[in-house]
Image (cartoon, grey):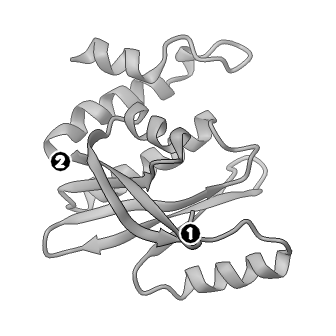
Amino acid sequence: MADGPYETIEEFRIHIKRCASSADASFWAVVSRTSGQILGYASFMRVDQANAVVEIGNIMYAPVFQRTTGATEAWFLLADRAFTSGFRRLEWKCNTLNKPSMRAALRLGHTFEGIFRQHMIVKGSNRNTAWYSIIDCEWSKVKEALEAWMQGDNFDASGKQKMDLVAIRNLLR
């Protein structure tokens, strides 16, 4: 991530104000349906209306929300919004040093497209960027797998998944 970590709550507030005034991105708060607790945010960024391309990015989740069913659902809701809004390509990009993000992109159904070497400078260092996408003709299968995975009967009483998302997607092919 190009920003953070934040030493103080005031630094984080300044960051949130910058996000809110961004001309490039549309930010979405992720809020718990049950508690109302703010769990993080994500954005539509690099919105290219002419080519119907959008990226879900600049994702920041509280540690308690990371790698949860809810995090998958939050991403799903944004992805579905993108495709139902007429976008034909959904992108995911991340630093190649961010292995959890690279795994998440594949798990969620993105296709790996390659690495842009020295794509940008972040915090004074070269960043290689991994690019992933889902295109409109793939979305129905990706969506079907996600909806099947999120069903309550795919989880035991303790919330542990019975079948992982990749296995469900492979089963539906």
| Residue under the point 59% across and 72% down | 123
Q: Quadrant of the N terminus?
A: bottom right
Rendered residue at 66%/43% (across/down): 66
Q: Secondary structure at mark 1?
A: loop
Question: Is 71 located above or below residue 39 in the figure?
Answer: above
- Between 43 and 151, the one nearer to me in the picture: 43
Q: Is residue 101 left or right of residue 63?
A: left
Q: Label for residue 2?
A: 1
Q: Position of residue 127 (x, y in %)?
A: 45, 61
Marks 1 and 2, Cα distance to the nearest angstrom?
29 Å
The residue positioned 65% from the left and 85% from the top of the image is 17
Measured from the top left, where is residue 111 in percent x and y? 27, 38
Q: Determine whether 71 is above or below 147 in the image.
A: below
Q: Which residue is mark 2?
A: 136
Quarter holding residue 31: bottom right
- Mark 1 belongs to which amino acid? Ala
